[in-house]
Amino acid sequence: MSRLFDPPLAIDMETDSLSRPVRFALHGRWHKLARAIERWEVDVDWWKVEGRVHRAYWAVTTTSGMLCVVYKELEGEGGWFLARPMTDRRRSRVCEFAVSGEIFWAVSSLHDLYA
């Protein structure tokens, strides 16, 4: 599995009427989403005045086959971020991604993000 971006990459996100992601822009290029595989929330240190992390994560695939994790900050100024793209470790262009104990396969490449 690929590593998280540190820091995550800020993206522009278009959502539908139910606030579900539809497409995102990274480095000026739009990526239309084919499917949202799963959504989950993380709410850490909610009892603290500062330092709370409250995010809505989505595992998504694009129409070009790229598989990645995006999230929306639910506290503070908000905003959408690309947390994890799938990488091609074996140069075979087949990548794996684990969500809730299942493994999903997709054809993708970091080249899809920047091309």
Image (spheres, helix red, strand yellow):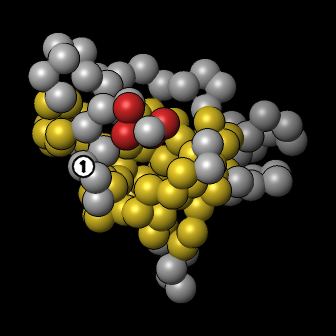
Direction from residue 75 to residue 27 in the image, left or right: left
Q: Is residue 43 above or below residue 103?
A: below
Quadrant of the image occupied by residue 87: top left
Query: Relative to residue 22, is residue 115 depicted above or below?
Result: above
Q: Quadrant of residue 13?
A: bottom right
Q: Residue at x 24, y 15 (%)?
A: 89
- Residue matched to label 1: 65
Q: In the picture provided, is 83 more to the left or to the right than 54?
A: left
Specify few, some or many for label 1: CA neighbours under 10 Å numbering under 14, 14-19, or 20 or more: some
Q: Position of residue 86 (x, y in %)?
A: 33, 32
Residue extending furthest right? Answer: 49
Q: Is residue 15 above or below residue 13?
A: below
Direction top: furthest residue: 90
Res 85 seen here: yes
Q: Position of residue 68 (x, y in %)?
A: 37, 42
Instruction: Give residue 7's position: percent from left, percent from top.
Output: 65, 25
The three-letter code of the residue at mark 1 reads: Gly
**Could you tell me which secondary element the residue under label 1 belongs to?**
loop
- Where does the N terminus fall, quadrant-wise? top left
Q: Can you see residue 55?
A: no
Residue at 54 percent of width and 25 percent of height? 5
Residue extending farthest to the front is: 115
Number of marks:
1
Question: As rendered, which of 43 and 61 lies closer to the eye?
Answer: 61
**What is the quadrant of the C terminus in the image?**
top left
**Rendered residue at 78%/34% (across/down):** 51
Q: Nearer the viewer, residue 1 or 106?
A: 106
- 5 or 102: which is nearer to us? 5
Depicted 107 relative to depicted 32: above or below = above
Q: Residue at x 61, y 32 (%)?
A: 8
Residue 26 position in % (x across, y down): 57, 46
